[in-house]
Image (spheres, grey):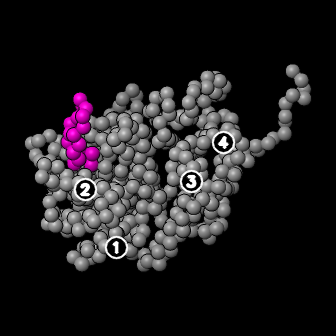
Amino acid sequence: MKILFWNTNSNSNINPYIASVVLDYNIDILVMAEYNANANELRTILRENQHYLNKCNTLGCDRVDVWCNYANVKSGIQEKYYSIQVIDDEFVMCGVHLFTDLHGDRSDERLAIIRKIMYDIQETEKEIQSQRTIVIGDINEMPYGRGCLNADGFHGLPMLNIADKPTRIVNEMEYRKFYNPMWNLMGDFSYPPGTYYLNQSKLHSPMWYMLDQVIVSKDILPLFKRESLRIITSCRYGELIDENQHPDKKISDHFPIMCEIEN
Amino acid sequence: MDKTMFNFELLDKDAPEIVIENSLKQIEEATRGYVIGNIGEYGGPITSHTKSTGFAAALGAFEKQSETVNIQDILGEQNGKQHRYEVFLTVKALEHYKYRMMFVDYGAVSYPVTIVMNENLAIEFSGKINETFCIESMKDLEDMMNVVINSDTMVSLIQSLINESLRQEAKPTSHTVETSD
C-alpha cells in the first residue's frame, strides 16, 4: 500500500505533476489538501496510463481529498479538518489538513482538534477491531510541536519498536504511543530538510518546516517500509524545486511525501 | 417568600437530547431512510475553533465562549453531572460514514444548553464565524434545529449522500468502493 500526500496549494494546473508522481511511484492511495484542479482531468490522465484511482467519499470534509485503487474502502467520520477512511476493513487511514500559524499561534486550537481526531480514530478502531492506523497530511506544525508530540495529541514519537510498551503513563493517565518517522528526515544530512520553506523575520525560525507528516500506530510498525519514506522533489513531468532548492511555488509551496505499508 | 412567587408549570418539558432526536426524525422521513440523523452520548473532547478572548485557549474540555468569567455560573452548579452528546448523520449502505453536525452540552440543568456546531452550519445559521451557541429554551432549540436541518449546507450535503448511497446500492456486493464523483 503506497500512500502519497500532497498539499497542492490550490494550483488548478497541477494535475500533470500529480499524475506523474502517482505513476512514478505507483501510488495506491492519494491524499491531497487544497486540491482545486479538475478531478475528471486527473482521472483521465491516470486512466490513459492504465492507473485507476477512484475518488473516495469525503462528503463533509472540506479540506482533504482521498483517491484510492482499493476495492474495499469505506468512508468513516468526515470532519472539516480530517477524513477517516477504512481500507480493507483493517486499516484506519486519517487524512488531515490542520490550520496554520501564519496569522498567529494556533497551536492550542490545533491540539484541541488533534485530541478530537484521536478520539474518532479510536472509535473507528473499535468498530473495525483493528489498531492499524495511519495518519497522513499537512499537520501545519513540526514533529516536536505539541499537537504532534504531546501524549494527549498524536503522541508521534521519534522512536518506537515493536517490543516497546504500547502506552506511556503520565499523571496516572495512560496514553497510546504512535510513531512519527518524519523525525528522521529533518536536518541537512539528506535533502530536503523539510516539506515547506519559509524564511520569516523572526528570532525563532528554522526556515525549513516538516509540516507534512505521516504518523503510524504501533500495529503498523511491522508493516512500515522505512526505506519507502521520502519527500519527493521531482517527477518525470518536471522538477518540483525552484532555483533556490525550495518548493517551486508555481507548482506548490509544499513537497509531497510518500510511504509504503505492507498489506 | 411569597407562595405565589414560583411557577410550577413545566415549560421546557423535554431534555435537549429529546428535542433534538424529535427534530432529526424529519431527515429520515424526507430521505426515505437513506440518511438518518442521530444523537448519541459522546465521551470525547468538544472543541471550538474560535479563540476565546482573555481565556487559556487550550480546549481539552468544553468551554463556553464568553468575554468575561461569570463566577455565578461556576458557583451555581456543584453536582458535576455533565450531559454531552454528538449529533450526526449516518447513511444507508455507507457502513462507517458519519458527518457530525454539532455537539450538545449541559449540566444538571437542561437549559440553557450549549451547542458547538459544525463550522459550515454555524456560519450559515448565524452569518458569523461563531460555532458556540447558548440556547435558552426548548422552543429556541427546536427553532434552531429546524433552521439548521433545512439549511442550504445540509440540504446539499444530504442530496450528495443520497446519491452516494444509491451508487453503493447499485454496485455488485463484491465491489465496495465508496466514491463521490
The reply to whether callout 3 and callout 2 are in contact (CB within 8 Å) is no
Q: Chain of mark 2?
A: A
Q: Which residue is mark 2?
A: A252
Q: Nearer the viewer, mark 1 or mark 4?
A: 1
The magenta stretch spans residue A196: yes
Residue extending furthest left?
A189
Query: Which amino acid type corresponds to the residue marked 4 in the rendered image?
Result: Ile
Q: Chain of mark 1?
A: A
Query: Which amino acid type corresponds to the residue marked 3 in the rendered image?
Result: Glu
Q: Which residue is mark 1?
A: A40
Asked if marks 2 and 4 fall on the same chain, the answer is: no
Asked if marks 3 and 2 fall on the same chain, the answer is: no
Check the image and report above or below for A246 versus B37. above
Residue extending furthest top?
B1
**Disc on the earlier residue, 3 or 4:** 3
The residue segment tinted magenta is A195-212
